Image (cartoon, rainbow, N blue to C red):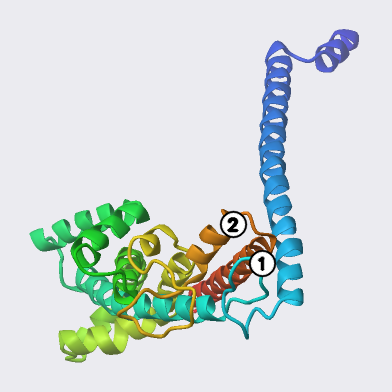
Amino acid sequence: MSTNRINTVATPSFEARYDKSLYNKRRWINTLGLGFAMGAMAFGLLWLFWILFTLFVEGAQGIMQLPIFTADTPPPMSVGGLRNAIVGSVMLAFSGLFIGAPIGLMTGIYLSEFSHGSWLGKVTRFLNDILLSAPSIVIGLFIYALMVKGNNFSGWAGALALALIVIPVVVRTTENMLNLVPNTLREAAYALGTPKWKLVTQVTIKAAKAGLTTGVLLAFARISGETAPLLFTALNNQYFSTDMSEPIANLPNTIYQFAMSPYDNWHTLAWAAALLITLSVLLLNVLARVMGNRSHLR
């Protein structure tokens, strides 16, 4: 009697053996999936680090060997720098940001705070989604047909093209950040008799200030390295110029022009310009991430 009981207890049941085999199978599949995922990540990171390593090595040589910040872009086989292109890129990027960011912020505020269920809000969101997914070269061609064709290339045309890239990014981030503000804040402000305009300016915008700043920084990082819109609008300029009504030098088009040339000194300057753009975009993205984390902590 006792022997049978011991054998019954010691022998695992069919259900227990089935559950164990199923667990082992799922564990093996999970390990296989994690292995494929880690392999894909390693494959992507390998090329990323290879590109960044090459960029930093080649670009650092140009920055250390040439007067990058004090001389303008040179003729072939001559020593020069990128001063005119750096100044032109800063002017174009900030001009596009100052044109597009206010429009994007106001549109995002309208969509989040005033367009509840209205047909205009739905149409605006639809058009913003289209503009957000539009290729930058299409935007450049549109501004070319609107401002450049029949006139001349200019910095203002380039700034407007960049502004059209800034607007949908800022609209989307502004609406999302304002929607994250708790409705209890709005209800408390209404309970105190706060008018709508004051609620928006003094409560919701202040509560989402870090998130709104993050969206603007991300939009600025987006336009810092755009080449196609400037190729059809601002073109380029070999000489130093701050006249936005004329073609103006910029780093993206300088990289495109110099990298396609057969001259070694232009290749070195192209690497240096690419490194400068990469560092600036990286800095802006890190700053935006820090601002975004700070808004979540609050």
Q: Nearer the viewer, residue 38 or 2?
A: 38
Disc 1 marks which residue?
77
Residue 187 sits in quarter: bottom left
Residue 56 position within the rendered picture, expressed as x and y whole percent measured from the top left = 72, 64
Badge 2 marks a residue whose secondary structure is helix
Q: Residues within 10 Å of mark 2 (few under 14, many from 20)?
A: some
Which residue type carries mark 2?
A: Ala
Residue 205 located left or right of residue 125:
right
Q: Residue farthest to the right?
A: 3
Q: Residue at x 52, y 66 (%)?
A: 254
Q: Nearer the viewer, residue 293 or 15?
A: 293
Residue 151 sits in quarter: bottom left
Q: Residue at x 26, y 61 (%)?
A: 144
Q: Nearer the viewer, residue 91 or 295?
A: 91
Q: Earlier in the sequence, mark 2 or mark 1?
A: 1
Q: Is residue 61 above or below residue 213?
A: above
Residue 236 located left or right of residue 110:
right
Residue 240 position within the rendered picture, expressed as x and y whole percent measured from the top left = 48, 82
Disc 2 marks which residue?
259
| Image mark count | 2
Residue 150 position within the rendered picture, expressed as x and y whole percent measured from the top left = 19, 64
Which residue type carries mark 1?
A: Met
Query: Which disc, if any, is residue 278?
Result: none
From this viewpoint, is residue 218 visible? yes
Q: Residues within 10 Å of mark 1 (few under 14, many from 20)?
A: few
